[in-house]
Amino acid sequence: MKIVTYQSSNGAKTGVVQDDRVIDLESCGFPASMKDLLEQGIDVAAIALKLDEGSSVPLAETELLAPV
């Protein structure tokens, strides 16, 4: 699982790269910022279970940012 920070129309957000898409972790119920996600603790199993619930954008159209 590759957790990334990316630029959205609403600012920097956390996401997961899955195939050719970036899934918005905030839309899955997780913090929008990488700092908050790290402070909460990354539960990879919980993230994996909720990925189907999240909205996504094409990876090719996404600007990836520095992780933290």
Image: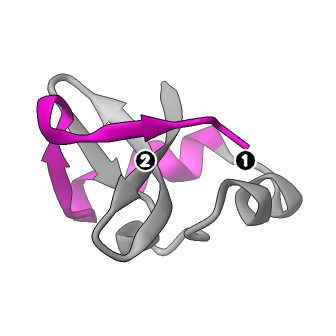
Eye-nearest disc, 1 or 2: 2
Front residue of 46/64: it is 64
Find residue 62 and report its horizontal and vertical position in percent.
25, 41
| Residue nearest the observer in this picture, 30 or 10 | 10
Closest to the observer, 1 or 20 = 20
Which is more N-terminal, label 2 or label 1? 2
Q: Secondary structure at mark 1?
A: loop
Where is residue 55 shown, x and y percent of the image?
A: 20, 63
For the point 56% across and 52% down, which residue is it? Answer: 46
Name above or below for residue 14 compared with residue 40: above
Image quarter in which the C terminus is found: top right
Q: Amino acid at mark 1?
A: Ile
Which structural element holds mark 2?
strand
Q: Quadrant of residue 26?
A: bottom left
Q: Which residue occupies 25% across, 64% down?
A: 53
Stretch of the chain drawn in magenta: 44-68
Q: Label for residue 28? A: none
**Residue underneath mark 2:** 6
Task: Determine which quarter of the picture holds residue 37.
Answer: bottom right
Which residue does the image show at 43% across and 47% down from the upper left?
Answer: 6
Q: Is residue 31 left or right of residue 7?
A: right
The span from disc 1 to disc 2 (Cα, nearest Å) is: 17 Å
Q: Residue at x 72, y 47 (%)?
A: 42
Could you tell whether 44 is left or right of 4 in the image? right
Q: Crowding near pointer 1: few (<14 within 10 Å), some, many (20+)?
A: some
Label drawn at residue 42 = 1
